[in-house]
Image (cartoon, rainbow, N blue to C red):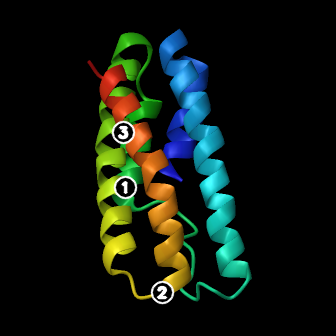
Amino acid sequence: MFEIASSRLAIQRGDEATRAFAQQMVTDHQKTTDELKGLHASGKVKTPLPATMTPYQQSMLDKLNGLQGADFSTQYHADQESVHEDAVDLFKRYGDEGDNADLKAWAAVTRPALEHHLQMAKDLNK
């Protein structure tokens, strides 16, 4: 949710490179969100899906909402690198050790795209 919400904001406020990255984040993360919702709807994933961001994610989004221009871009780039590092770690751990076979397979298939996002975020954050 954070990646989508912050990237929608970046599409409005970012420079050209930031907007291009942000548009890809919205597209790709919406796709994975829809896939996860599909697994849940099929009954293959029983855990309730989150309805809101974590307090930490919400605080990061609130901070971004208060920024403009270069300050916005600098913070957005740093946030995207950080959240994608966390996502890659989570998907790697669950893909290797998860207890739900369908979710484990989805995490393993999805992780390369997140690793690509992380590399893109690092390149943007240089």
Callout 3: 10 Å neighbours few (<14), some, many (20+)?
many
Judge from the rendering whether residue 21 lies leftward or rightward of residue 8; answer left or right.
left
Q: Residues within 10 Å of mark 2 (few under 14, many from 20)?
A: some
Examine the rendered structure and indicate whether residue 2 appears above or below residue 104.
above
Disc 1 marks a residue whose amino acid type is Ala
For the point 49% across and 14% down, the residue is 17
Residue 8 lies in quadrant: top right
x and y, in percent, of residue 22 in the image: 54, 29
Secondary structure found at label 1: helix
Q: Which residue is mark 2?
A: 100
Q: Position of residue 60 (x, y in %)?
A: 36, 43
Residues under numbered marks 2 and 1 in contact, where contact means CB atoms less than 8 Å apart: no
Q: Which residue is mark 3?
A: 118
Q: Is residue 10 above or below residue 32?
A: above
- Mark 2: secondary structure: loop
Please report the residue visible at 55 percent of the width from the left and 38 percent of the height from the top. Answer: 25
Identify which residue, 60 or 24, lies in the foreground. 24
Against 21, residue 26 (above or below) is below
* C-alpha span from label 2 to label 1: 18 Å
Q: Is residue 15 visible?
A: no
Observer-nearest residue: 5 or 39? 39
Displayed quadrant of residue 108: bottom left
- Which residue was labeled with disc 1? 87
**Does the CB distance between marks 3 and 1 fall below 8 Å?**
yes
Image point (35%, 33%), residue name: 119
